[in-house]
Image (cartoon, grey):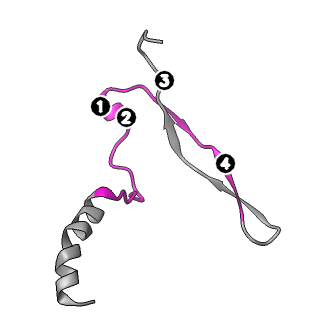
Amino acid sequence: MSYGLRQLLHPLTWLEHKALFFPEHSFRGTPEHVGLEYDDIFPIARLSNSSSENKNTKLHGWHMPDTSDVV
């Protein structure tokens, strides 16, 4: 890539790094740390690939019930 084109695309590269979400493998806290009620949930995701095999993957998440009266 030429130097001029690289300089032109630089702001887009910076924006790409700021706008993309990269999940972490470990937790830094739970919703309880900021005063929210929650339940741990462990849904199972069924992943299928090009072969006839299906693979189940256990996920981890939080269910935070709504506490407002607004419908």
Q: Which residue corresponds to mark 1? A: 34
Residue with the mark numbered 3: 65
Query: What count of labels does the image hold?
Result: 4
Residue at the outermost top position: 69
Which label belongs to residue 31? 2
> SS class of the residue under badge 1?
helix
Which is nearer the N-term, disc 3 or disc 1?
1
Q: Amino acid under label 2?
A: Pro
Instruction: Give yes or no for contact between labels 3 and 1 (Cβ–Cβ under 8 Å).
Output: no
Residue linked to disc 4: 44
Question: Which residue is at a point 72% across and 67% down the rendered structure image?
Answer: 49
3D distance between C-alphas at marks 3 and 1: 15 Å
Task: Describe residue 1's horizontal placement relative to residue 45 as left or right.
Answer: left
Q: Residues within 10 Å of mark 1 (few under 14, many from 20)?
A: few
Alpha carbon of mark 2 to alpha carbon of mark 3: how far? 11 Å
Separation (CA) of disc 3 from disc 4: 20 Å
- Give the mark, 1 or 4, whose residue is nearer the N terminus: 1
The mark nearer the N terminus, 2 or 4, is 2
Residue 50 to residue 59: above or below: below
- Write the start and end of the magenta stretch as one range: 19-48
Q: Quadrant of residue 34?
A: top left
Q: CA distance from mark 2 to mark 4?
A: 22 Å
* Viewer-side residue, 64 vs 12: 12
Say whether marks 2 and 1 touch (CB < 8 Å): yes
- Amino acid found under the numbered disc labelled 3: Pro
* Residue occupying the point 17% across, 85% down: 4
Precedes in sequence: disc 2 or disc 3: 2
Q: Quadrant of residue 17?
A: bottom left
Q: Is residue 38 magenta?
A: yes
